[in-house]
Amino acid sequence: QVQLVDTGGGLVQAGGSLRLSCAVSGRIFSSYDMRWYRQAPGKGREFVAAIRIGGSRDYGDSVKGRFTISGDNVKNTVYLQMNSLKPEDTAIYYCYAAGGSLSIPRWGQGTQVTVSS
């Protein structure tokens, strides 16, 4: 049973940095298509970043050049390093896993990121 636990959110001033973590239980994270999404109040869920099976990475246009997705095979954890944060980055951030042996995608519980101006 694959489970995802999202941590690392918090309150930060504009221009600051945070690192989110997604701890993966079950198989190693590189067996899946791992993504981060976010949802701001009153808005739909937005794609943020992905690290695919095979290691390629994608980013949403609004975070390119500021956010970096990475993984640690030893800790079986996926990270989202967020730099130069803006108030519009305020949202709940969710880790997501799909593909591989998963018949249905899995979501983390979400972690709140608040960026003050």
Image (cartoon, rainbow, N blue to C red):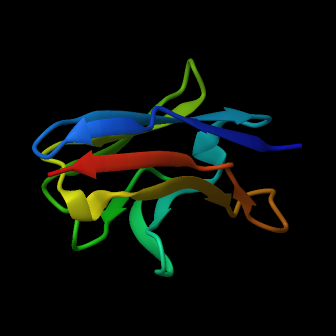
Q: Quadrant of residue 107?
A: bottom right
Position of 51 relative to 40 (above/below): above
Q: Quadrant of residue 6?
A: top right
From the viewer's perspective, is 7 left or right of 115?
right
Q: Position of residue 25 (x, y in %)?
A: 75, 33
Q: Residue at 26% across / 49% down in the picture?
A: 115
Position of 47 relative to 27 (above/below): below
Q: Residue at 68% across / 62% down in the picture?
A: 98
Residue at the extreme front of the image, as rendered: 117
From the viewer's perspective, is 38 left or right of 6?
left
Q: Position of residue 19 (x, y in %)?
A: 35, 33
Residue at the extreme right of the image, as rendered: 1
Q: Residue at 10% across / 43% down in the picture?
A: 15
In this view, the residue in front, 112 or 53, is 112
- The answer, for residue 40, to whether it is visible in the render is yes
Q: Position of residue 36 (x, y in %)?
A: 48, 57
Q: Residue at 30% across / 35% down in the picture?
A: 18
Q: Position of residue 58 (x, y in %)?
A: 33, 64
In this view, the residue in front, 114 or 68, is 114
Position of 68 relative to 26 (above/below): below
Position of 58 relative to 19 (above/below): below
From the viewer's perspective, is 105 left or right of 83?
right
- The answer, for residue 53, to whether it is visible in the render is no
From the viewer's perspective, is 74 left or right of 9?
right
Q: Quadrant of residue 12?
A: top left
